[in-house]
Amino acid sequence: MDFTDKVVLITGASAGIGESTALLFAKLGAKLSLVGRNQANLQAVADECEKQKGLKPLAVVADLGTDEGVEKTAKDTLEHFGRLDVLVNNAAVGARTTIQLANMETFDHVFNVNIRGVYNLTRLLVPALIESKGNIVNVSSIMATMVTTGNLPYSLSKAALDHFSRLIAYELAPKGVRVNVVSPGITVSTFVQRLTGYSDEEYRAWLKTAEATIPMGTATTGDDCAYMIAHLACDKLSRVVSGAVVPVDGALQFAGSGNSEILKEQIK
Ligand SMILES: NC(=O)c1ccc[n+]([C@@H]2O[C@H](COP(=O)([O-])OP(=O)(O)OC[C@H]3O[C@@H](n4cnc5c(N)ncnc54)[C@H](OP(=O)(O)O)[C@@H]3O)[C@@H](O)[C@H]2O)c1
């Protein structure tokens, strides 16, 4: 994989999966536009990226839950680099709620960041991607298809993101623009602690319990996701791959699906 001279925009690059993805693309020679709200964290990631190949990333501090933040992200990136080759829509927020506990503020917050922001940023950057025959990688979640209680608007937003990706993959295919999705399972990042307020110790205990539910017995890392994002963004490795939704989850999506009793003794 080589992204020399490619301009790659990564949202949610100030932490977690976005941070790992930024570092990987920096190692692969990309020119980076990195987006997040926390300026200090974003700058720290940008500095780390610059150390890889000496290329200074553009750090865009913006709230992607607002139209202004989205417009600033698109404008600053195109003004700075004059082109875009890869758009990674990674930033998202979670929410713990059910239909019985729900309120519309939570719904709007989740959908503003996870769907409206992605829709709007993609809309604004599609002309540049058509020009470069670039591609999009959206970061979804296996929660888009798993059925659980407590993740209602988040799961809905990710289901919408998956289908948005398929719809625009089809629309943009004749223009030479590919669109794919990486769907992480339980991934080590700051996401769960933001959602729950767990201390580091509580988070470690939660992760241990959560890992026990993963068929492969291990949580996903930011690097696991970054490698798949880069794989899908790479025209050499994924030339005609578009509309794909790739789980990076240790087969967690199938947990709870049940095992046949037949041949149990032979395969244990
Ligand atoms: N962690 C998991 O278990 C897991 C599982 C499945 C899918 N995912 C998905 O993976 C992606 C990355 O999540 P993560 O685990 O890396 O989470 P994370 O550690 O919480 O990082 C989230 C990133 O998104 C940014 N962000 C959030 N709201 C934003 C907003 N309104 N405007 C701009 N940036 C915003 C954050 O920036 P600031 O901190 O600067 O605000 C941060 O850089 C998300 O799409 C998430 O749904 C995660």
Image (spheres, rainbow, N blue to C red):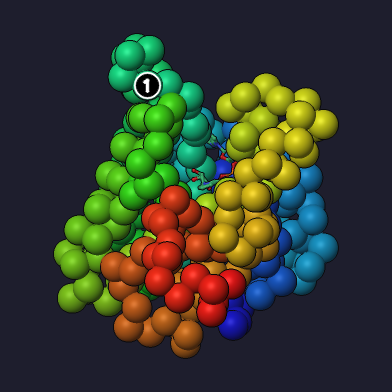
Q: Is residue 89 at all visible to an observer of this figure?
A: no
Location of the N terminus by quadrant is bottom right
Which amino acid, by three-letter code, is at mark 1? Thr
Q: Compare residues 170 and 123 and report the one nearer the observer.
A: 170
Where's residue 43, x and y in %?
A: 74, 43
Q: Residue sitting at 49 percent across and 78 percent down?
A: 234
Which of the pair 41/60 is nearer the observer?
A: 41
What x and y, as percent, mark residue 61? 59, 36
Residue 211 against residue 112 in the figure, above or below: below
The reply, left or right, for residue 143 in relation to residue 8 is left
Residue 204 lies in quadrant:
top right
Q: Residue at x 22, y 73 (%)?
A: 173
The local crowd at label 1, few if under 14, some if 14 to 19, many if 20 or more residues have their Cα within 10 Å, is some
Q: Residue 5 location in percent, x, y?
A: 57, 75
Quarter of image, ligand 1: top right
* x, y percent for residue 216: 61, 64
Q: Which residue is mark 1?
A: 98
Q: Is residue 36 above or below residue 112?
A: below
Instruction: Determine whether the residue tagged by mark 1 lies in a helix, strand or loop.
Output: loop
Residue 123 appears left or right of 209: left
Residue at 77%, 60% (x, y): give it: 50
Can you say which quadrant of the picture contains the C terminus?
Answer: bottom right
The quarter of the picture where residue 75 lies is top left
Q: Is residue 174 above or below residue 114?
A: below
Q: Residue at x 50, y 63 (%)?
A: 251
Q: Is residue 5 left or right of residue 48?
A: left
